[in-house]
Amino acid sequence: MDIISMEAKHTSGLYAKQPIAFVRGQGATLWDVDGNAYIDCSSGHGVANLGHANPKVAAAIADQATKLLTLFETFPNDQRALLMEKLTGFTPGLDRVFFCNSGTESVEAAFKFARISTGRIAIIATMRGFHGRTLGALSATWNKKYREYFEPLVPGFSHVPYNNIQALENAVTNETAAVILEVVQGEGGVYPADPEYLQAARRICTERGALLIIDEVQTGFGRTGKFFAYQHYDIVPDILCCAKSLAGGLPMGAVLIGERVKNLVPGAHGSTFGGNPLACAAANAALSVIEEEDLPGQAARKGAYLMEKLKAIQSPEIREVRGMGLMVGIELKQKVAPYLKALQEKHIIALNAGMTVIRLLPPLVITQEQLDQVVAALAEVLGAQA
Ligand SMILES: *Cc1c(COP(=O)(O)O)cnc(C)c1O
């Protein structure tokens, strides 16, 4: 079976297909159909924080699959109840939770919660922000390339420059329902928030009766060196969106909900698959692994090591290295596409973030040896002087 040409024949056309067919993974390693090993620095865009084929997650999925796969959330379930307890245990001040199936769904839910809670319409997002591709989430997403052809989008959205306190002061009024922010802008180029900025956002929202929505779809579950990235900043949001790595690789999203969010009544929102016992069992196993293996601590240590090594690369192509934990951006002076291709030829899978940033999102279980291989390959393709 020729995997690549079969996909080429039937693809929607929405994805720029790469010429490698992967069939297996383990930790931070992926194997192609011919058995060649690659180091994965993409984690499926931040899904595989625990690494591929985590045995505890696999066992939990297999076990739950023989018990109960689906159950609408009107009926309580053991795995869901446990997950509600466990997940909210990581987020003091956010004690309620809504389950869905993806990042964009968590953002859609957050916007609906903000509007029903405040009775207001306006939602303020940021330039370079990314929040998903369904029409509501897309309305908060900045990049023209995702938005063109789909406008007009949902009314009531506006964008302000990121990390600019004065712009937020000017934009948020007594008619603002919510402000939505990423703690580290991911797709937008790996830009961490300044501490003063998130703290000001918290204060401004509180003062003006708006809700603060933090989108941790990419930064959650240990990625930045804390369980959630906002926990570096001494703030608590009103609404927290998460997905990607929540269920160890299975599709799942969640919205964590604070006390200022009101009027969430039966029927106001819902999801058929949301909170299904299979995804909840996978998430329960994933959260246990994150705790037992201290993945946030691993991300902090390995991220510091990686950033130090990357900053030491003497290459005329590098403009800046920035990031938080194992979410790292290498901004180049030119387009990154040829460099990503060269890395791929060296069996390293990395991502872009915009045109000029190489983004590294390895599984948090990546080994030191693999990190060294990644740094060496980067130095080589970037033409570094030894
Ligand atoms: C990936 C991502 C989303 C969208 O998640 P999907 O599961 O692809 O819908 C939303 N927000 C952020 C910050 C993301 O990185």
Image (cartoon, rainbow, N blue to C red):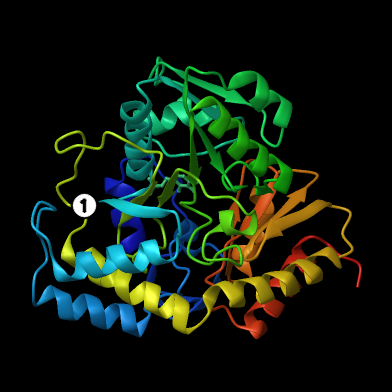
Q: Nearer the viewer, residue 95 or 2?
A: 95
Q: Is residue 130 visible?
A: yes
Can you tell which quarter of the image residue 374 is in?
Answer: bottom right
Residue on which the image places disc 1: 274
Q: Residue at x 57, y 78 (%)?
A: 366
Q: Nearer the viewer, residue 15 or 47?
A: 47
Q: Residues within 10 Å of mark 1 (few under 14, many from 20)?
A: many
Can you tell which quarter of the image residue 361 is in?
Answer: bottom right
Q: Residue at x 53, y 62 (%)?
A: 42
Q: Nearer the viewer, residue 339 or 75?
A: 75
Q: Is residue 118 above or below residue 249?
A: above
Image coordinates of residue 297 in percent, x first then y, are 60, 76
For badge 1, the amino acid type reads: Gly
Image coordinates of residue 280 in percent, x first then y, are 24, 66
Quadrant assignment for the N terminus: bottom left
Q: Is residue 194 above or below residue 82?
A: above
Q: Is residue 365 above or below residue 140?
A: below
